Structure formats: C-alpha cells, structure tokens
Amino acid sequence: MKVPHLGEYVEGELGRVLRALSVADRDGNHAGFRALCRRHAAELDADRDAWLSVPRELRESFRSNMDGMRPFLLTAQRIARELDGLGRPAALRQLSGADKPGHPMEKLHEAEILAEDGEFEAADALLREELGEGLADDRWVAVIHSRLATHAAKRNDLDTAIEHAHRAHELTRRTGSRDAERAAEVLEDLLTAREIRRGTTDGRRLGACREALTHAQRLSDRALFVESNRALLRLLDELDAYPEDSPARRFLGKLCGLLGLNHFHLGDRDEARAWTRKGLHECRRRGDRVGEEVYEANLKEIVRRK
C-alpha cells in the first residue's frame, strides 16, 4: 500500500515542512532531517497537534492496517525525539502518552521509541502491560504481539518470536484484518530461520527453496514471467524429490500460485487457472487460510477475465 507522507493533510507552510521531513526520513537523509527540525523547531512545537493526531482521512487506514501505516507514525516519533533533543519535550511527552494515559496507541508509540533506542526489555514491559489490561479489540492485541515478535527476533530469541507471531497470525485471521497475509509471511520467515539456524537437512532445504522462490518472485515483479516460470519449474522438480513430510514442501502453495499469476500475465488463462487451482488445493491441504483466500480471489479474477 502507498502510505501518505506526514503532512499530506496539513495545509500551508507547516504541511510543506512536514512532507519534506517525511521524505527525508524515508530516504534515510538523516542530516537533512535534523537540519529541517532545527530550522522549523518553533513552528513544529507550537502546532504539534496538527501532526501528532491521526488525520480524519486516514483513520480507517489505521484501524484496518496499523502495521502498514507504520512509516507515517515513525516519522512523527522521530520529529518528536528530535525536538526533545532541542529542548522542546512537549511533543514527545504527548506522543508517549504522558498527556493521555491509558490509550493503547500512546503506549505503542512509547514502546516504539524505546525499541528504536535498543531498549527492548523496557519496550516489551510496556507492551505486556497492555496485554495484561485485557484489551477487547483483537486488532490491537495482534499488533502488540507482532511488535513483541519483532523485538524477540532482533534479540535472536526465535522461539519467543515464533510464539508471538503465531498469536498475531491467529488474531489477524480471526478478525479478517488486511494484515493477515503479512502476519503469515512473518511467521513463515521465523519458522524458516529457526530451521536454518538448527543446521538440519530440512533447514538447508528450506533456505535453498526460499532463496529460489524469492528469485522467481523478483523476476515476476520485473515482468520477466517466462524466466520466472523456468525458475519455478526447476524448484518444483526439487520439491517433488523431497520426502512428503519435508517442511520445504510448504512452499508448494506459493510456487503454484505464482506460476498461475505468471501465466495469467502471459495471457494463458487455462494454465493460469490450472496452476492457481493447484496452489489453492495445496493451501487447503496444509491449512493455509490466507493462501486459500488469495488464490480463491485470483481464480475469480481469471474466470471473470476469460
């Protein structure tokens, strides 16, 4: 999804400054970002409500896809931290929840700030405190578990990361969140990383298959659909030679689905339908509900275009 820049819905000079800060932040232009904060510190501090609150136009996006909207929030956090370093702490206090105690989003902001400084234990304590409050909104609980999974992975505690990623995946599927597909990918990556770290035969196969599938996806993204299909068919031959219980065979659903998508782009609807059906069948067999939804939607589109 295309995430709007901070300041997109702020008028006048302040909006221009905020958009420039957002661009600098996402481009990794740290020197330019700090210079802009210093130059416009007074107006950023005085009009902080204009950029610390979620614009009305974006509230639905935040409710449905909090993880996807993170770049928007992170820019606001970084501006607030920069202003705090310039002797203007009001924005950071407001963002961290000092002015609105108990709101989940404020606690999440504060945990993000701590995590960015490498203070994962303090960040996790805040997030677990929120879980202990018995939040009624499963979408918030999923976001918190996804953050805990990310922090654990950064500490190389893959078992804990997988535990939280499992929970986030379950919750996003249950709520029908748009984050369900991303949560499934995160969980898959963590499970694969753990197998690779263990140095088992399955781990080596998983690593090689993931690398081959990623390569095929990149070819497809560049519209090199024939080349992508060649790479996928080579990988399929390898997977077919593996034992039925090999963890690497869980890539079959994605492999067949991508073959279907490539054939669709090449204009071969019959092959597209056949491979997509195979991908759907594989996802159903393995209980991959997110994959089921994706390939069911793809099949409908193939039939509609026929």
Image (cartoon, rainbow, N blue to C red):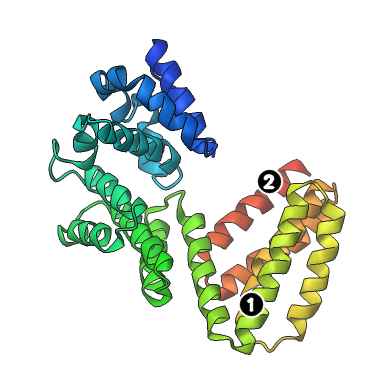
Residue 230: percent from the left, percent from the top?
Answer: 85, 64
Q: Which residue is mark 1?
A: 206
**Along the horizontal axis of the image, is 166 left or right of 215?**
left
Residue 278 shows in the view: no
Q: Residues within 10 Å of mark 1 (few under 14, many from 20)?
A: many
Residue 46 higher or lower than 151, as above or below: above
Which is more N-terminal, label 1 or label 2?
A: 1
Q: Nearer the viewer, residue 84 or 108?
A: 84
Q: Which of the 4 image quadrants contains residue 91?
A: top left
* Mark 2: secondary structure: helix
Q: Nearer the viewer, residue 160 or 183?
A: 160
**Quarter that holds the N terminus:** top right
Residue lying at 12% horizontally and 42% vertically, measured from the top left: 101
Residue lying at 47% horizontally and 37% vertically, measured from the top left: 30
**Quarter that holds the C terminus:** top right
Q: Nearer the viewer, residue 113 or 213?
A: 113
Residue 84: percent from the left, percent from the top?
Answer: 25, 35
Q: Which residue is mark 2?
A: 301
Query: Residue flagged by tag 1: what amino acid is it?
Result: Leu
Residue 236: percent from the left, percent from the top?
Answer: 77, 73
**Along the horizontal axis of the image, is 66 left or right of 268?**
left
Tag in front: 2 or 1:
1
Query: Residue flagged by tag 2: what amino acid is it?
Result: Glu
Residue 296 higher or lower than 95, as above or below: below
